[in-house]
Image: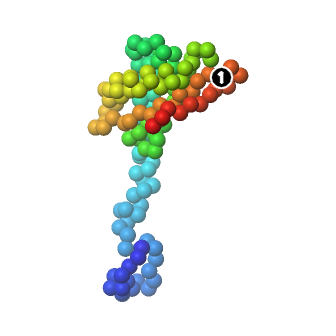
Amino acid sequence: MVLDKRAREQMLAHCGEIHADDGVDPRDFFKVGRIFKKEDRKAKQLCRQVAETLDQVLSGETRDDILRGFHVSEVVPAPNSSRLLVTLHADRGVGDFDRKLVEKRLAACSGRLRCEVAAAITRRKTPTLVFNIVGPVSGGGNLICRSPK
C-alpha cells in the first residue's frame, strides 16, 4: 500500500512500524477465504443442476436427432459461475460424427438450452453456456474439439 507523507506520519503516530496490511479494513482483508468456500459450494451445486437439466433436454426433449446422440459429461465454471463450460460426449461411432454440423446445431439450439437452464435454476441471471465437444476416435480414445467462442 503506497502512502502519502501525511498518511504515513499519522500511522507512525499510532504504531512503531508500517506493514503491508496496515490501513486495510479487516473485513476486506479476511473476506477472500470465507467467500471463496461459499461460492465454490454454490458453483458446484449450480454446475450439477445445469448438467442434469442439459442431459435431460439433450436426451429426449430436443427434436434434433444429431444432438440426441450426445450426453453431458461435465459442467465447470469458466472462469466463474456466470459462464459455464459444458463438455458434451458423443455416443455414436466415428463415421456419424461431423463437428461442423454439431457446432451449427448447438448454436441454433443454444437459446432454448439456456432457457431450459433458466427454468431449472433459481438465479437472477442465467449463466452463459460454452460447449466443449468430445467426439469418438477409431483408436478407442476421445478427440477433444472446442467450439469457437
In the rendered image of this protein, does residue 91 appear above or below residue 145?
above
| Horizontal and vertical percent position of residue 99 | 54, 24
| Horizontal and vertical percent position of residue 83 | 41, 39
Return the residue at label 1. 137
Quadrant in the picture for residue 24: bottom left
Residue 110 in view (yes/no):
yes
Label 1 amino acid? Val
Q: Residue at x 46, y 73 (%)?
A: 20
| Horizontal and vertical percent position of residue 27 | 36, 62
Q: Secondary structure at mark 1?
A: loop
Q: Is residue 25 left or right of residue 89?
A: left
> If the image is split into quadrants, where does the N terminus sit?
bottom left
Q: Residue furthest right?
A: 139
In the rendered image of this protein, does residue 37 appear above or below residue 108?
below
Q: Residue at x 62, y 22 (%)?
A: 136
Q: How many discs appear? A: 1
| Viewer-nearest residue: 106 or 88 | 106
Q: Residue at x 50, y 32 (%)?
A: 147
Q: Residue furthest front?
A: 100
| Horizontal and vertical percent position of residue 58 | 44, 19
| Viewer-nearest residue: 99 or 120 | 99
Q: Residue at x 41, y 46 (%)?
A: 38
In the rendered image of this protein, does residue 80 appear above or below residue 71?
below
In the rendered image of this protein, does residue 63 appear above or below residue 29?
above
> If the image is split into quadrants, where does the C terminus sit?
top left
Badge 1, how many Cα within 10 Å: few under 14, some, many 20+? some
Q: Is residue 42 left or right of residue 74?
A: left
Q: Residue furthest left?
A: 124
| Viewer-nearest residue: 75 or 144 | 144
Residue 86 in view (yes/no):
no
Quadrant in the picture for residue 137: top right
